Amino acid sequence: MMENRSTPEEVRQNLREIRDRIAEAARSSGRDPGEVRLMAVTKTVPPELVNAAWEEGVRLFGENRAQELLEKADRYAFGPEEIHFIGTLQTNKVRQILGKVSCIQSVNSLRLAEEIQRRAVALGITVDVLLELNIGGEESKTGMAYSQLEKILEELASFSALQVKGLMCIPPFGKNSLETEGYFERMHKIFVDIRDKKIDNISMETLSMGMTGDYELAVRQGSNIVRIGTGIFGKRNYPA
Ligand SMILES: *Cc1c(COP(=O)(O)O)cnc(C)c1O
């Protein structure tokens, strides 16, 4: 497999540049750059290279696959507090990742939330989650439809072992920057609307949006976690 991976030195350089650009995007939109956390997305990246990002001060990592997380976690320089799960999560994998990540960002259905609740109760822990919204209304994408959101939030208000901390999205690919920024703007509006409703057990602290190709637009629209893979570690040889 040929992967166009960065070297550790390139990872350092990429991180410097990305941080500068995040800070610039924040300042130019009147935000404090310190509000935006940089997540390094580690799918298919060997642990040694992931650890190079940690050495460079990255303190948040995103994992997509339960199996890959379990295989790599032992060799990471950091622990579950610094890992969020961001991939599509099958209900039968929930048990494997609980306790191994500090947040599940990709809760995309009530059914998945119920399984997390059930497993977390059994373990006597509470789990932070974000709700993934299908902001583009795409049939091919996972994520909750906006039309379902209010009803799901009402249900989740009574989940004792699950705490909703915010929202996450992956906007449609292949749009121009104006359209993409429009999706992010809409996400931010939904985020603020929910926050203002002050629903039990639902706190809107985290708005996770923006990837390698669009993180500056996301920062301008209020993102406080940008999830970056390719921009830090180089190209993957297959999309995932
Ligand atoms: C892969 C992935 C990212 C990072 O994508 P890049 O374009 O490589 O920065 C962000 N979020 C999710 C959910 C991903 O699966």
Image: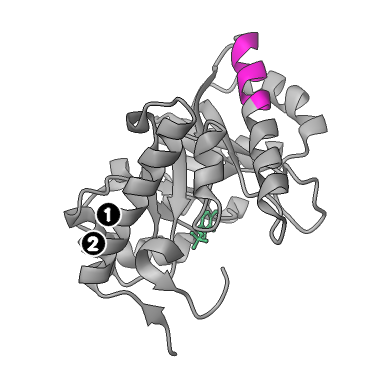
**Quick check: 218 left or right of 70?**
right
The majority secondary structure of the magenta stretch comes to helix
> How far across and how far down the image is residue 134, in percent?
72, 44
Magenta extent: 189-197
Q: Is residue 7 above or below residue 72?
A: below
- Residue at x 63%, y 49% (from the top left corner): 170
Q: Quick one: SS at disc 2?
A: helix
- Residue at x 45%, y 39% (from the top left corner): 25
Instruction: Quadrant for the C terminus, please.
Output: bottom right
Furthest residue to the front? 28
Instruction: Quadrant for the N terminus, please.
Output: bottom left
> How far across and how far down the image is residue 220, in percent?
53, 35
Q: Is residue 233 magenta?
A: no
Badge count: 2
**Quick check: 80 left or right of 93?**
left
Q: Is residue 191 magenta?
A: yes
User: Can you identify the residue that label 2 sits on?
Assistant: 12
Q: State the separation of the CA atoms marked 1 and 2.
A: 6 Å
> How far across and how far down the image is residue 4, in percent?
40, 81
Q: Nearer the viewer, residue 106 or 181?
A: 181
Q: Nearer the viewer, residue 234 or 201?
A: 234
- Looking at the rendered structure, the kind of residue marked 1 is Arg
Circle 1/circle 2 CB separation < 8 Å: yes
Residue 134 appears anywhere in the view? yes
Q: Nearer the viewer, residue 121 or 53?
A: 53
User: Can you identify the residue that label 1 sits on?
Assistant: 16
User: Counting other residues with Cα less than 10 Å from the Cα at mark 1, is it few (<14), some (14-19), or many (20 or more)?
Assistant: few
Q: Quick one: SS at disc 1?
A: helix
- Looking at the rendered structure, the kind of residue marked 2 is Arg
> How far across and how far down the image is residue 89, in percent?
58, 53
What number is the disc on residue 88?
A: none
- Residue at x 33%, y 47% (from the top left corner): 20
